[in-house]
Amino acid sequence: MAEKRRADARRNLDALLEAAKAVFAASGVDAPAKEITDRAGVGVGTLYRHFPQRSDLVIAVLEREIDACAEAGAGLSADNPPDAALTKWIQRYTELVATKAGLASALQSSDAAHEALRAHFYERMSPVLDSLISAAKIRPDVSATDILHAVVLLSHPVPGEAPGHGRHLVDVFLDGLKI
């Protein structure tokens, strides 16, 4: 019985994280908890048992997305030539930043509450990007941190520009990396 509960708890946690990801994308991180729990098919108590504060849920969703992006690096390297793998990974990272407005703010914030998220971000993303960079032919004076920061900065919305404008700017940046 205890194993079933653990499996149920894992399923509930996965359902909550997937629901929160979708709800946050559609309605923002301040969406009502009920909207998340309804989508996940669980009760509000289950949400608060896993995530006592809203910030806990937001951070868990962001960490999960960071992990997925980082894990994509190996597959892209295996399936593509080095330059293409780097480009495809940066495009995936750009999507992460562009669709998770809270991520860019959290990474640039001096708020101590975001320190663990920043540490997780750099621990997961930097090694993947270092590996992709070392295999690709790009300017030698560009580091993984340079790329991570540039994409965040280029992905900020620009008043009067279409939402995809940041992706265009990242494409221009990618062209400038090539040697």
Image (cartoon, rainbow, N blue to C red):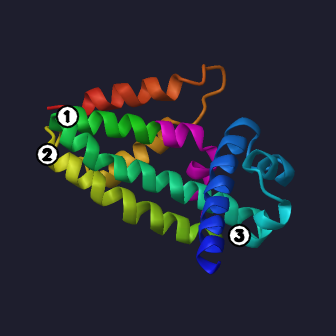
Q: Which residue is mark 3?
A: 50
Mark 1 or mark 3, which is nearer to you?
Answer: 3
Q: Which residue is mark 2?
A: 135
Q: Amino acid at mark 3?
A: His
Residue 80 is tagged as: 1
Q: Amino acid at mark 1?
A: Asn
Q: CA distance from mark 3 to mark 2?
A: 40 Å
Q: Residues within 10 Å of mark 2 (few under 14, many from 20)?
A: some
User: What type of secondary structure mainly makes up the magenta span?
Assistant: helix
Residue 178 is at least partly visible in this image? yes
* The magenta stretch spans residue 161: no
Q: Position of residue 169 (x, y in %)?
A: 43, 27
- Secondary structure of the residue carrying numbered label 2: helix
* The magenta stretch spans residue 109: yes
| Residue 170 vs residue 68, the one in the foreground | 68
Residue bounds of the magenta highlight: 95-112
| Residue 172 vs residue 4, the one in the foreground | 4
Q: Please identify the quadrant where the N terminus is shown.
A: bottom right
Q: Position of residue 162 (x, y in %)?
A: 60, 19
Relative to 143, residue 163 above or below: above
- Secondary structure of the residue carrying numbered label 1: loop
Relative to 20, residue 92 above or below: above
